[in-house]
Structure formats: structure tokens, C-alpha cells
Image (cartoon, grey):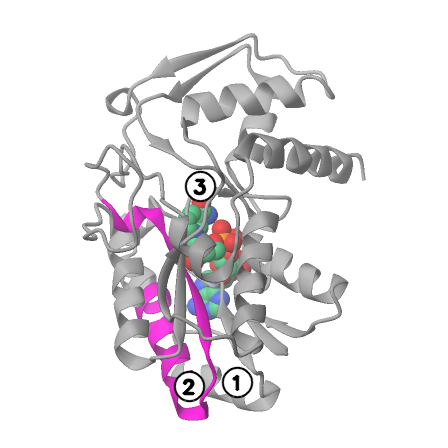
Amino acid sequence: MKILVIGSKGQLGHELVNHCKNSGIKVSGFDLPEIDISSRDQVEKIISDTAPSLVINAAAYTLVDKAESDEITAYAVNKTGPGNIAESCRKTGIPLIHISTDFVFDGKKNNPYLESDKVSPLSVYGKSKAAGDDAVRDILNQHIIIRTSWLYGVYGNNFVKTMIRLGKERDELNVVADQYGCPTCAADLARAVLSTAAHIHDKKETIWGTYHYCGKGITSWHGFTEAILEYAGQHIPLKTKKVNAITTAEYPTPAKRPSYSALDCTRIQENFGISQESWKESLKKTIDKIISADKG
Ligand SMILES: NC(=O)c1ccc[n+]([C@@H]2O[C@H](COP(=O)([O-])OP(=O)(O)OC[C@H]3O[C@@H](n4cnc5c(N)ncnc54)[C@H](OP(=O)(O)O)[C@@H]3O)[C@@H](O)[C@H]2O)c1
């Protein structure tokens, strides 16, 4: 198996490349500025030069609030980009694993979203990602789309790192308590994606299409913050004594977010044998790594 990871400098892309290298899987990783996925020519050239047996697209425009005022770039990266990759994969007969998001849903459900549930994104980011997923489906039969949620990890900026930083600076924090979802550790997601890749490679009968993978368990941003600070506080000095629960209305943001976006992950378990990891246990392992990386 020879994998091409696009978006290799992102939270997930970094973990994918590391995991391949540690497992002896041949991998090449590309990101901006070596590849801009909104350019058909650049995508074709990299796929032709690297000649992979499978492509994983972890590249995306992920600045959810900024996308509201930068719709053109969000669509170029999240819709045109996956379309370009799918087109090149179709021409060369290479399967594609593409990553998508819980933000394609509007959050009106009150039990975990199934892959077959209707998408109804609330934000430019969510709409552009849903459009990218449709482009992949329309162009390439041999595709797997894996939707995930609330991604955090050791690489790049994310909610966990922000809360640890604020925990060092502030006595009290105000965090939204009426949006619920499933925190997902980027290293766990990378393992799930690569297990899916192995399944495809081993030529077991692959059921192409859309899947969900996220951490096991549901919480709010407030609950997530309390867990982050409780565990980090056992290892480093923190100032925060209190995390106040606030409402979405009290914390207005440019982009609307779903109030509930837990994902049902039964399908990936049934078709590929991939199990979810407890978000709380993975959080502890990731905080250990973040703290030791900070110590240098
Ligand atoms: N982060 C989350 O909470 C979350 C939740 C659900 C789903 N997801 C999905 O999970 C996937 C991975 O997310 P992530 O958090 O790992 O994202 P990330 O850390 O933002 O990484 C995305 C990477 O794509 C690169 N990129 C942006 N525009 C590009 C372009 N035109 N051509 C090539 N590369 C480009 C980015 O480069 P720059 O940094 O230089 O822009 C970055 O290195 C994405 O599909 C995302 O939509 C993320």
C-alpha cells in the first residue's frame, strides 16, 4: 500500500503521516504551498508524480467563523478541492478517503446522527463541506467519506490547547454549555482512517460511501472544558478555579453551529470492524503529549 496524504501539515494529516511511518506504510504527504487542492493541475501533477495506491484528503478550510466572510476561499478549498482530487482519482483508478464534518447537520436531532440523515448545514463552512462531499460522490465511485467531529490533537491549534492556555491565564472561564457533540482525538481518527485504508487495500469487499467516526461519549463544550482543566491541572499549575456554563446566545459567533452533532458510528464498526475510543481516555493521553511537547 502506498498512501498519498493531502493536508499533511494539519491536525489529522500530521497524525496520518506519523502513523504510516511508524507502521512501515509507504507514505507521501503534501500540503500548502506544495499543493493547492483548488488547482486541478497541481492535484493531477502530485497524484501522477507520487502514483499512490490510495489517496487520503485531510486538507480543508477549517476556520469556521472566518468562512462566513471568506466564502470564495472556503468553497475553493472545501468543494472545488475534493472535486479535483476525486476527478484525478477517477482518471487513474485510485480510491479516495475524504474527511468531512458533523457541521453538515443542523443539530435539530436529539439522538446521534446516522450517515443517511439529511444534511442541512447552518454555516458557510458546513455548506462548503457538504458541497465537497457531493462532488466526491458524483465523480468517484471508489470513495469513502468519513465524517468526524470536534477534532483535537497534539499538532496545530485546537480547543484543548486553547483551554489549557486560558486555564493558565484566567481565574474564571465562560464556556458554552448548550452545544453537544463528540470530541475526537486526531490520533484515534488517523488509526480509524488507516484501518479503513487497509481494508480497501486487502481487497475485502468494500462497501463504498459515507461513514462516521468520532470519540465515544457525548459532552458539551463546557463539559469538555471541565475535563480538560481537571486533568491538565493534575500535571501543571492552572489559575482557573471556575468554569461558568453559558448559552450560545451569550457567546455570539459569526457562524451558526449545530446545538447537537453527535455521530452514530455503528456503520464503520459493522463494515470495517473499527471501534470508537472513549473521548475522556483519549483526552488524557493527548494532554500528556501536549504537556510534554510544551516542556520541549
Ligand atoms: N477541526 C475540527 O474540529 C474538525 C471537526 C470535524 C471535521 N473536521 C474535518 O477533518 C479534516 C481535518 O481537519 P483538521 O482539523 O486536521 O484541519 P487543519 O488542521 O485545519 O488542517 C487542514 C490542512 O489543510 C491545509 N489546506 C488549507 N487549504 C488548502 C489548500 N487549498 N490546498 C491544500 N491544503 C490546504 C491547511 O493548511 P493551512 O493551515 O496553511 O491553511 C492545513 O494544513 C477536515 O476535512 C475537516 O473539515 C475537522
| Label 3: element kind | loop
Amino acid type for the residue under numbered disc 1? Ile
Q: Which residue is mark 1?
A: 47
Which label's residue is closer to the chain start, 3 or 1?
1
Residue 82 on the magenta span: yes
Residue 216 in the figure: left or right of residue 236: left
Q: CA distance from mark 3 to mark 1?
A: 29 Å
Q: Position of residue 121 (x, y in %)?
A: 22, 49
Q: Is residue 171 above or below residue 139?
A: above
Q: CA distance from mark 2 to mark 1?
A: 7 Å
Q: Are marks 3 and 2 in contact (CB under 8 Å)?
A: no
Crowd rating for badge 3 (residues with CA inside 10 Å; few <14, some 14–19, many 20+): many
Whether the residue under disc 3 has CB within 8 Å of ligand 1: yes
Which residue of the protein is positioned furthest toward the right in this rendering?
A: 296
Quadrant where the C terminus is found in the figure: top right
Which numbered marker is on residue 150? 3
Q: Is residue 83 above or below residue 49?
A: above
Q: Which residue is mark 2?
A: 88
Q: Are marks 2 and 1 in contact (CB under 8 Å)?
A: yes
Q: Position of residue 208 (x, y in %)?
A: 38, 71
